[in-house]
Image (cartoon, helix red, strand yellow):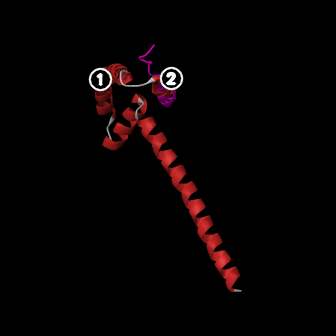
Amino acid sequence: MKTKTIFLLILVFISGGLIGSFLTGRSFKKRVHQLKEQRKPEVFREHLHDVLGTNEKQRHSIDSVMNIYLPRIKEARMENHETMGAMHDSMLSEVRLFLDKEQEDKLVRFEKRFYRKHHQRHNGKLKDHRK
């Protein structure tokens, strides 16, 4: 009788851990998706209007201001991405000076994985500065 109780307790704890892990993963994934969506100008614009509770006149005025700044912000983000990529390449070029052949091969494989992941993370929308 005692072993059945212990077995059931262990089963309950394991089930609770699995369910908790699953729910935490889902909520994290949902939050990351929401943050990605907030980057989109149209979603940001609507969210701002919802938070501020703007009327039609305010909405129109705010939209005209945002139409000026959002393309500039996007352009600045792209320029920053390219600048950071160039600095990263410069850094790795200097690091290469201290590597032997085997380490350099590892660095090449690392770079391929890094740039592939980075490119996928941005859905291919950001230009790869290395091309």
Q: Position of residue 56 (x, y in %)?
A: 34, 33
Q: Earlier in the sequence, mark 2 or mark 1?
A: 1
Q: Tell me which corner region of the image, top left, top right, bottom left or bottom right, holds residue 45.
A: top left
Kind of residue sitting beneath label 2? Gly
In this view, 4 is above or below 35: below
Classify 23 as above or below 63: below
Q: Which mark is residue 49?
A: none
Of residue 39 and residue 13, the one placed in the foreground of this image is 13
Q: Quadrant of residue 7?
A: bottom right
- Quadrant housing the N terminus: bottom right
Q: Residue at x 31, y 24 (%)?
A: 73
Residue nearer the viewer, 26 or 61: 26
What amino acid does circle 1 point to? Tyr
- The magenta stretch is 110-131
Relative side of 36 to 77, left or right: right
Q: Is residue 23 above or below residue 10?
A: above
- The CA span between labels 2 and 1 is 24 Å
Q: Which mark is residue 124?
A: 2
Name the residue carrying label 1: 69
Question: Is residue 124 one of those drawn in magenta?
Answer: yes
Residue at 46% x, 42% y: name it: 32
Asked whether the residues under the numbered discs 2 and 1 touch, taking CB atoms below 8 Å apart as contact, a structural biologist would say no
In the image, residue 5 sits, relative to residue 52, either above or below, namely below
Indicate whether residue 119 is drawn in magenta.
yes
- Helix, strand or loop at label 2? It is loop
Local SS, label 1: helix
